[in-house]
Amino acid sequence: MFLFDISNALTLVLMLTATVLLIFLAQEEKKSFINAITLFGYIAILVMHVAQVATLGEEYRVLLPVLSRCIVIDFIFIFISFFAYLWVDDIETKEKGKKSISNSLDWFWKKV
């Protein structure tokens, strides 16, 4: 069974570094779709891990704690990517002079 183990320390550091670099690139280019791509990528990895848990055979029950850690880490990366997307989207709308539909997170962005 193939397992993309992101709870491994080296893989976790590499994914965190790639995520931070993509957030920085999106912020510099003022393009929110870059963070949207990473967000959908992490959602796809989450779906893969949940499908693996759902179809886990008896002989692979020892992998359940590893898959559970991977799912928690997936949610953390989705959380980071989602707020990075919202942040860069706010920067992009201010740069292009477009008005956002809802400014309900203005209190949050003023504190960042």
Image: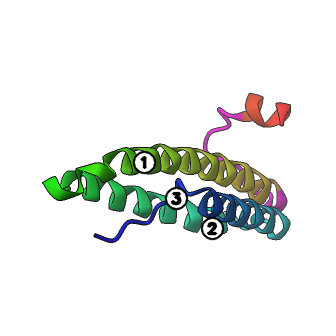
Report the front residue among 80 and 52: 52
Amino acid carrying mark 3 in the image: Ile
Q: CA distance from mark 2 to mark 3?
A: 24 Å
- Whether residue 55 is visible to the viewer of this picture, yes or no, is yes
Is 71 within the magenta? no
Determine which residue is flagged by label 2: 33
Determine which residue is flagged by label 1: 71
Q: CA distance from mark 2 to mark 1?
A: 24 Å
Residue 6 marker: 3
Report the front residue among 25 and 67: 67
Q: CA distance from mark 3 to mark 1?
A: 9 Å
Amino acid carrying mark 2 in the image: Phe
Q: Magenta region: which residues?
A: 95-105
**In which quarter of the view is residue 104 placed?**
top right
Residue at the (37%, 51%) spot, across then down: 67
Upstream in sequence: badge 2 or badge 3: 3
Residue 20 pos. (x, y %): 74, 59
Label total for image: 3
